Amino acid sequence: MMNEEKMKKAGLEYEQGLKRFAGKQPLYEKYLRNFLTDSHFDESRTACEAKDYKQALESSHALKGIAGTLGLTKLFQAASELVESIRHEEFHKVEGYFKVMDEAYKISCDAIHSLDE
């Protein structure tokens, strides 16, 4: 079973995420595990570093949607801030928001890894 402390730290709302999967725990946990191999975070990092804001917007927006669906609240919020800064062409904020998203991503992955502890 997932480590509750890690869930809270990650802002993982397990019960809310489970509801989005019609209460089917194996299916929900499968998608949580699949998140660990999703490429949108890495694509967002690469795009932000290259200042390719169009690609950064696309990949960060996709990451935001996945995080929201899975109940990864802190990651969802961090990705939302990054997306909004790009949409409003506040490019000077991108690096700072990406750092917040990076930390939320790492914490989220750590919580998901705890499924198998």
Image (cartoon, rainbow, N blue to C red):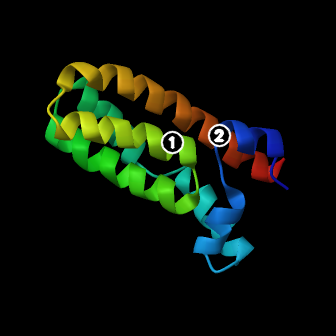
Instruction: Classify mark 2: residues with Cα within 10 Å, few (<14), some (14-19) or many (20+).
Output: many
SS class of the residue under badge 2? helix
Amino acid beneath label 1:
Leu
Q: Give the camera-side residue of 96 and 107.
A: 96
The image quarter in which residue 83 lies: top left
Q: Total marks drawn? A: 2
The answer to whether mark 2 and mark 1 are in CB contact below 8 A is yes
Residue 37 rendering spot, x and y as whole percentages:
51, 51
Vertical order, 36 against 50 (above or below): below
- Name the spot of residue 4 as percent of width and height, x first: 82, 46
Query: At 46% from the left edge and 27% from the top edge, which residue is drawn?
Result: 100
Q: Secondary structure at mark 1?
A: helix
Residue matched to label 1: 75
Q: Residues within 10 Å of mark 1 (few under 14, many from 20)?
A: many
Residue drawn at (58%, 33%) of the image: 106
Above or below, 76 against 20 in this view is above
Residue 117, compared with residue 52, is above or below; it is: below
Q: Is residue 31 left or right of residue 85?
A: right
Q: Which residue is mark 2?
A: 10
- Left or right, 61 with reference to 65: left
